[in-house]
Image (tube, rainbow, N blue to C red):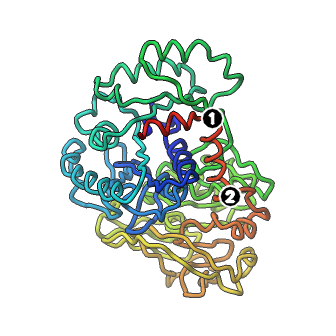
Amino acid sequence: MVWGTSSWAGKSVLTTALCASLRRRGARVVPFKAQNMSNNARVAEGGEIGAAQYFQALAAGVVPAVEHNPVLLKPEAGTRSQVVVLGRVDRALTQTPWRERSPQLWDVVRRTYDSLARAADIVVIEGAGSPAEVNLADVDLANLRIARYADARALLVCDIDRGGAFAHLFGTWSLLEVEDRLRLGGFVLNRFRGDPALLAPGPAILEKLTGTPTLGIVPMTDHGLPDEDGADPGPGRGTGRRTRIVRGPAASNLDEWWAMREASDCRWATAPADLADAELIVMPGSKLAVADLAWLRATGLGTALVAAHRRGVPILAVCGGAQLLGEEIYDPHGAEAAGRYAGLGLLGAVTTYGETKQVHRARARFRADLPAPWAALSGLEVEGYEVHYGSTVPSRRAGTGAVIGPAFTDGSGMVCGPVLAVYVHGLCEDPRVVRALVGAEPPRPITSVLDGLADLADSYLDMKAVMALLS
């Protein structure tokens, strides 16, 4: 099991690297995270799972499935989360107070883990936050309870780049019960810059205090794995055209733009000035489109989008992003907030929310005769996934005055002047699509990224000691 001293310590990357390394050694390995919290979800076999577990499954060489992340919490507000169980929304649990959910979810977690463990040599379990969150110990599914049930040995990783690493590690160890300290097999210092010799005598002192050795010093590295939260603040690293991704408070599935950020001058847009030099604007998914619509108007970004549209700047809108650009969002069932809401009016379409979330893999082919500025996409067959409540259809009013046509040969999606609106997520993980949009391909396909993570584990972790923990 991989524990962390905090969120963002490196649990997801380390788990992925271990899956890739163990697979390379010939083991039948599977990832598992009992409960994740993220609005970056992927569609796997059976429904939605956290994006991190999707990539961990690929690293392990198995087909991503809901069993790899049986419980997914998707934040909807400061005190509310949608509860997804084995890939599907559970409305009753979504309405259940936090501390009352755990007893109802444990049986699902236990049965799912047992099923995976029976078919694998090694299950690599990722924790959540920290195992030392004593305020949540009685309802913790993702750290201590699953570790005890699986009788897992654990690694504890911290982000040394933040400072205070030895205090974080010792403090976490000191707050664990004795039985949990005993299952801790090693510490990992992540994101280290500089000469490892400078760390002495820190690891030795820590081992003397805890009896736990340091089994890895992982350098700060550009590993290329999509950030689980999709919120890496750094600019894109590529040479392709200037791409600006409008990132509202409820923006979702931001991790799908990692390839775009590798290939282009790609930045988040959170203020009107961020769109001033845009050559391509992306409207990503949104977990709460009505709330993000209000944010666009309050910040002035809505006005800036209208101005960019008038200049003819191409706008790629995906899922919730397409809903925001339409003329109206109608929520008759209270999926988000019951009522009718005026959109930005850049897409001659209206969105109606249904009662049931649509979750499925998708395959489509762009029309052979897409007009400018989307002509470079013409004829490309693409794969992705859909996760949404709303259905968006052309408006009879067609208030934009632009001709609306389908984007795909099956009649789905829309092209409306400089706007391309689709419900399919994941298009820009296809290098051909990225090249068509920004004029350059990402330098590393996901297979190369996963191979690099296996190399990272083999080079900087004491894998002999890690393997010994499994015996």
Residue 427 shown left or right of residue 85 in the figure: right
Residue 442 shown left or right of residue 11 in the figure: right
Judging depth in this view, the residue of 93 and 155 nearest the camera is: 155
Q: Of the numbered discs in the image, which one, if any, rests on residue 113?
A: none
Image point 36% across, 53% down: which residue?
A: 72
Could you classify mark 1 by the number of other residues whose Cα lies within 10 Å: few (under 14), some (14-19), or many (20 or more)?
A: some
Question: Which residue type does callout 2 highlight?
Answer: Met
Q: Of the numbered discs in the image, which one, if any, rests on residue 260?
A: 2
Instruction: Tell me the quarter of the image containing the C terminus.
Output: top left
Q: Secondary structure at mark 1?
A: helix
Q: How many marks?
A: 2
Judging depth in this view, the residue of 97 and 50 nearest the camera is: 50
Image point 55% across, 87% down: which residue?
A: 410
Residue 8, x across and y down, in percent: 51, 37
Confirm whether residue 294 shows in the render. no
Residue 300 shown left or right of residue 170 in the figure: right
Question: Which residue type does callout 1 highlight?
Answer: Tyr
Residue 403, x across and y down, in percent: 64, 83
Judging depth in this view, the residue of 458 and 282 nearest the camera is: 458
Image point 43% across, 13% down: which residue?
A: 209
| Quarter where residue 161 is shown | top right
| Quarter where residue 440 is shown | bottom right
| Quarter where residue 128 is shown | top left
Residue 153, x across and y down, in percent: 39, 36
Q: Is residue 315 above or below residue 252?
A: below
Q: Is tag 1's residue or tag 2's residue first in the polypeptide sequence? A: 2
